[in-house]
């Protein structure tokens, strides 16, 4: 079975996927830019006309994280691994830095904002289950940005089962299921916006179940690559397509009739997911061919490694800056403040990564229960999967920023 326009080749997979690590930083910085400039009116620290309203689109960078997470999870998939060992690693990967950043977030979003704490809502954010209830207060409790980790948590919970199903399916069937899921995202957004209040519709579109098709897209793409499928694609093409789409999106919002403009909003998540998948595919294929570019350079890879901490900290820092100094004038001079604050957050992210995330993860891995390391899947059965060409050295596992 084959996809039209895609050819099957047999080439060794690279030992590492440095460009994908670097891509995480660009997605995190895009989200930071959205929070810095705000969503219009008097939100955000300051608005630069040169990049506004296009900077608002950066919030959709979370779709890249979700697709990338699904891709890399399959890339490092171990069919005989005990689910307990997988879950143990996920806890060590996510929670230490999350808990430290939550302290800053609690100060920024509650104490400095003089906002009363709803303890049940705040506790739900500690355990990353805040997106499951429409009644949390505020809508994004705790460290606001960790709603994406709540989405990731469902994928992690399902991955041991989903991965064993996915590797048994033909790539074509996986593609059809994925396409159906992305269409479902569009339909759910349309239905929720048409039938619910804006606040309830926003909760629906943050619900973890709604984002599962983006993870499935990443899984499908990874399996296709590991099975030898290739699509001639230079990385510049999907990047240009993304830029063109962002431009057309905002132009369409002003020029199209109301109904057609609304469809742009309903379609934005699945469209961005597909464009993110094409960007990932283009860079992975370069590394498969042994080509290295700017994203494979060590400084870029380091930024990618720090991107999780960058993501956790950036919004709290922006919020505290607003409380301290107020909003900046809406002019292009704001870009210098954006870059300056970005550098500050990068330094803090490096500190959090070096002092907490990396050492805590290593310590946690060393203390994995031995019974999970010795055992395979539950019941001791070996899972038979189609042969996949796996990398000799596994890349660092992802976490959604």
Image: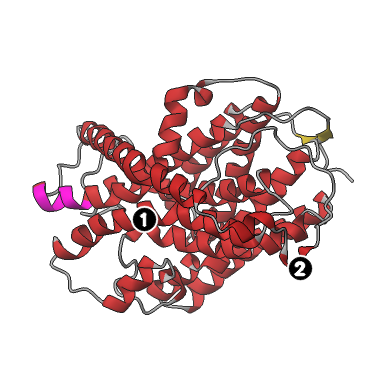
* Residue ID at (36%, 51%): 97
| Residue 325 - label | none
| Residue at the extreme right of the image, as rendered | 1
Image coordinates of residue 258 in percent, x first then y, are 47, 62
Q: Which residues are magenta?
A: 319-324
Most foreground residue, 259 or 91: 91
* Residue ID at (40%, 48%): 360
Is 322 within the magenta? yes
Q: CA distance from mark 2 to mark 1?
A: 34 Å
Per the picture, the main secondary structure of the magenta-coloured stretch is helix
Most foreground residue, 260 or 378: 378
Image quadrant where residue 163 sits: bottom right
* Residue ID at (60%, 57%): 370
First along the sequence among labels 2 and 1: 1
Single out the mark in the foreground, 2 or 1: 2
Is 321 within the magenta? yes
| Above or below for 191 versus 52 | below
* Residue ID at (23%, 37%): 341
- What SS does tag 2 mark? helix
Neighbour class for label 2 at 10 Å: few (<14), some, many (≥20)? few
Q: Which residue is mark 1?
A: 98
| Above or below for 135 versus 70 | below
In the image, is 76 to the left or to the right of 98? right
Image coordinates of residue 376 in percent, x first then y, are 72, 58
| Above or below for 82 versus 237 | below
In the image, is 207 to the left or to the right of 172? left
Q: Which residue is mark 2?
A: 379
- What SS does tag 1 mark? helix
Image coordinates of residue 395 in percent, x first then y, are 59, 37
Image coordinates of residue 73 in percent, x first then y, are 62, 49
Most foreground residue, 279 or 24: 24
């Amino acid at each position: 079975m084959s996809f039209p326009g895609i050819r099957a080749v047999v080439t060794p997979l690279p030992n590492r996927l440095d460009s994908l690590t670097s891509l995480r930083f660009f997605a995190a910085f895009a989200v930071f830019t959205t929070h810095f400039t705000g969503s219009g009116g008097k939100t955000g620290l300051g608005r630069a006309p040169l990049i506004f309203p296009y900077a608002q689109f950066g919030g959709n960078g979370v779709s890249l994280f979700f697709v990338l997470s699904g891709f890399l999870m399959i890339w490092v998939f171990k069919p005989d691994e005990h689910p307990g060992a997988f879950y143990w690693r996920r806890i060590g990967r996510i929670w230490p830095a999350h808990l430290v950043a939550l302290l800053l977030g609690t100060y920024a979003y509650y104490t400095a904002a003089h906002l009363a704490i709803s303890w049940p809502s705040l506790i739900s954010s500690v355990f990353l289950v805040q997106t499951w209830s429409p009644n949390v207060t505020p809508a994004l409790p705790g460290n606001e940005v960790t709603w994406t980790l709540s989405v990731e948590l469902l994928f992690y919970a399902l991955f041991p089962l989903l991965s064993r199903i996915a590797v048994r399916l033909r790539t074509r069937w996986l593609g059809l299921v994925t396409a159906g899921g992305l269409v479902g995202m569009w339909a759910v957004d349309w239905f929720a916006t048409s039938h619910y209040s804006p606040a309830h519709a926003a909760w629906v579109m943050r619900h973890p179940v709604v984002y599962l098709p983006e993870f499935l897209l990443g899984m499908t793409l990874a399996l296709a690559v590991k099975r030898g499928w290739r699509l001639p694609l230079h990385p510049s093409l999907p990047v240009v397509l993304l830029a063109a789409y962002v431009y057309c999106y905002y132009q369409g919002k002003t020029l199209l009739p109301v109904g057609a403009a609304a469809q742009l909003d309903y379609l934005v998540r699945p469209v961005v997911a597909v464009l993110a998948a094409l960007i990932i595919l283009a860079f992975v294929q370069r590394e498969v061919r042994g080509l290295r570019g700017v994203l494979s350079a060590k400084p870029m890879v380091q930024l990618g490694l720090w991107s999780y901490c960058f993501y956790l900290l950036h919004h709290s820092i922006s919020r505290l800056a607003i409380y301290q100094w107020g909003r900046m004038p809406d002019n292009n001079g704001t870009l210098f403040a954006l870059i300056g604050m970005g550098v500050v957050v990068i330094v803090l992210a490096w500190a959090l990564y070096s002092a907490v995330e990396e050492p805590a993860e290593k310590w946690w891995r060393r203390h994995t229960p031995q019974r999970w390391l010795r055992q395979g899947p539950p019941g001791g059965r070996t899972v038979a999967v189609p042969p996949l060409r796996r990398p000799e050295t596994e890349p660092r596992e992802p976490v959604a920023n």
